Amino acid sequence: MSPLPPREDPELPQEKLVRRLCALLSGYLESTQIDEVHRAYEVGNSAHEGQFRLTGEPYICHPLSVSLILAEMRMDTKGIMAAILHDVIEDTSITREQLREGFGEEVAALVDGVSKLTQLDCKSRAEAQAQNVRKMFLAMVKDLRVIMVKLADRLHNMRTLGIMSGNRRRRIARETLDIYAPIANRLGMNEIRLELEDLGFAAMYPLRARVLDQAVKKARGNRKEVVATIESSIHKRLHEGGLGECEVVGREKHLYSLYQKMRGKHLSFGEVSDVYAFRIIGNSVDECYRALGVVHNLYKPVPGKFKDYIAVPKANGYQSLHTVLVGPYGQPLEIQIRTRAMHHLAESGIAAHWLYKSEHEQSSYSQARAHEWLRDLLEIQKSAGDSMEFLDNLKVDLFQQEVYVFTPKGKIVKLPRNATIVDFAYAVHTDVGNTCVSARVDRMLAPLQTVLENGRTVEIITAPWARPNPLWLSFVVTAKARAAIRSYLRNFKKQEAIVLGRRLLEKELDAQNLRFDDIPVGRVEELLKRLDLGSRDALFEDIGLGNRLPFLVARQLVHADAQDTATPARTALSPLIIKGTEGMVVNLAKCCRPIPGDPIVGFFNPGKGIVVHLSECRNLEELRKKPTNWLEVQWDKQASGEFPAVIRVELMNQVGTLAKVASTISRMRANIENVQITNQDSQISVDIITLLVRDRVHLANVMRELKKLSVVMKISRVKSELRKKPPHGKTNHSD
């Protein structure tokens, strides 16, 4: 906006726009409703008085132009009023409360949903954009009209973008191509999507757009005759087949779609400019399939290029038959076949609900699909750590081509191209994704990173002990899977710490024949207040992470006058049982590598939880100087899992030596995690091997079998961290 004086004109531009708007609204609204719209205009015009756009027009002309775009979609009264008032909260002194008092909660909520967040504490423009997009989507979940007003707002801004500076123009164009055009596509609003893409392309790459536009116009003359000939042939054959009422339209590809095709497939304009596209519009689904048979008899279909979006609609509700034929001049012909209702839905998407009231079933289907997508986005935004992560997930979700796979019960699941089994598991349910361990694709076992193809049947195998692997983030492609994995990993350590902290505190209280639930609530609340903690879980988390010692907390709960800094005499306590599956808050020390069966001791490491060491670990000398920081622990008799253990092996340096060692270890059902050569000459090689074993007995059996090999000269377990580094570049034997 700029402080330019109003133009001296007998009829102001905003008055012309209001007249046009009222004339358009009179075609489908009652006179009382139009009066309400005019009242909204008067409030908006008064609020924006003295504000001007860079074009020199009064600022109110922009909201009126937005409302005209929506009126062409036959938007309802409240939506039109919100469009006229959509900038008053952001750019004038009018508040949301004043709007609610003057026009009701519905209009106020719509305007607030479209308004940008003000006074954001953001480090960058990108973060501010992400916060605003996130806010808009939360409002969209409640009312789809929010995004329709926003898309119309963006469309008018793009139509008047030329007045802005180059950098700002390119930034807005990039945002349009990255977010708003894909949203319009996702909601099935094809006409708005195409115009946003072409305007964004022209603003982002003006020279490329101009050159491509000139090339299309130059080629158009030659193509008109070809298009007319093919159109006539198709219509004639349809008439012969009893489908004379079907409409046949030859169409021209839009500039941005041409550019995307040239860029994506590395083609010149000459190689794509003669791809002809035709649309056949019938009266019923039966006519569509009959028309498909007619055109397949007229021209030869290209194998693998037929798609039935009538039987299996796209995620945005789009329905049509797609096929590619070899035309009379050897050029490919793209054919789309759909009913009139499907055509209205394809062009207008969720706007069809207002545009074509008579086709309520089709439009409500589109709305249902849009709401389903928004519900998924709501789940994603709840899992997202911040607005930037949400925006990244949104972009992943918007830019996708679909594949269709089946559950074992025959339900169709839509996924983006290159989706994996893990993406499928999360699409079924978040809990299924979090606990999946493997899968069967068409009854054959397949790894979780397998990329799914159309028509496959996928069965997920889960286990109650399983949890998401951080490595999954390297191959999942859906926003829902990515957000769920990140959320789980982000909260996993906290939940583990809470569980461990409660176990530790209960163990200390048990020595005094008490349970935590027996402690009076008032005493617990008093302690939480004294420690400045908000909840019991916060206390358990602090204990589990090693930030507070459990016996001191127990003492304060039992004796209210005890202080946190005291060093009490320890009571003889039963040891904490280690199962080996505690997770991120019980860590096995890497310096001594304890395994089930070893005598062990635990130490609190503030912020990380408990670190378990061998009782004879060298590092204990320093740790034992802090008696308040260690606790008695022992292995559970049923400890499960694989644990790393380190052995030192002196081998004869011969061809095939390492292969014999590896074969023996494998035969004993142990895995090799790492091999380092610390010393090597022509006769002897000293190797440090890290094995994954079940327990101490398993390790002893492996070492016993290795001793029997003739190439093994000496073998021992390493119980302290090696000081000597392996020679640079030596990682394996001569074999």
Image (tube, rainbow, N blue to C red):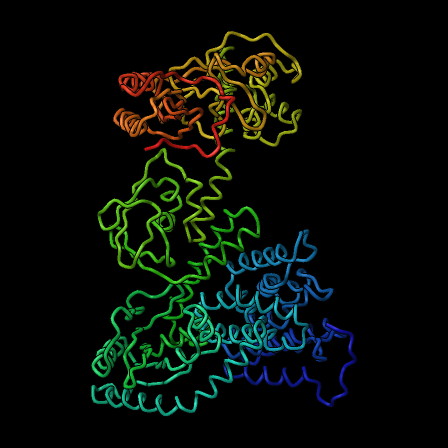
Q: Nearest the camera: 277 or 684?
A: 684
Query: Residue 76, percent across and down?
Result: 52, 73
Q: Nearest the camera: 263 or 579?
A: 263
**Does residue 103 appear in the picture of this structure?**
yes
Q: Nearest the camera: 64 or 230?
A: 230
Image quadrant containing the C terminus: top left
Vertical placement of residue 198 versus 694, above or below: below
**Does residue 643 appear in the picture of this structure?**
no
Residue at point 55% right, 67% down? 176
Vertical placement of residue 72 versus 518, above or below: below
Q: Nearest the camera: 38 or 221?
A: 221
Query: Residue 518, percent across and down?
Result: 51, 18
Vertical placement of residue 43 versus 228, above or below: above
Image quadrant containing the N terminus: bottom right
Query: Residue 598, percent across and down?
Result: 40, 14
Q: Is residue 57 left or right of residue 434?
A: right
Splitting the image into 4 quarters, where does residue 660 fall?
top left
Q: How many marks?
A: 0
Query: Residue 455, percent across and down?
Result: 26, 58
Residue at point 75% right, 74% down? 49
Residue farthest to the front, as pictured: 682
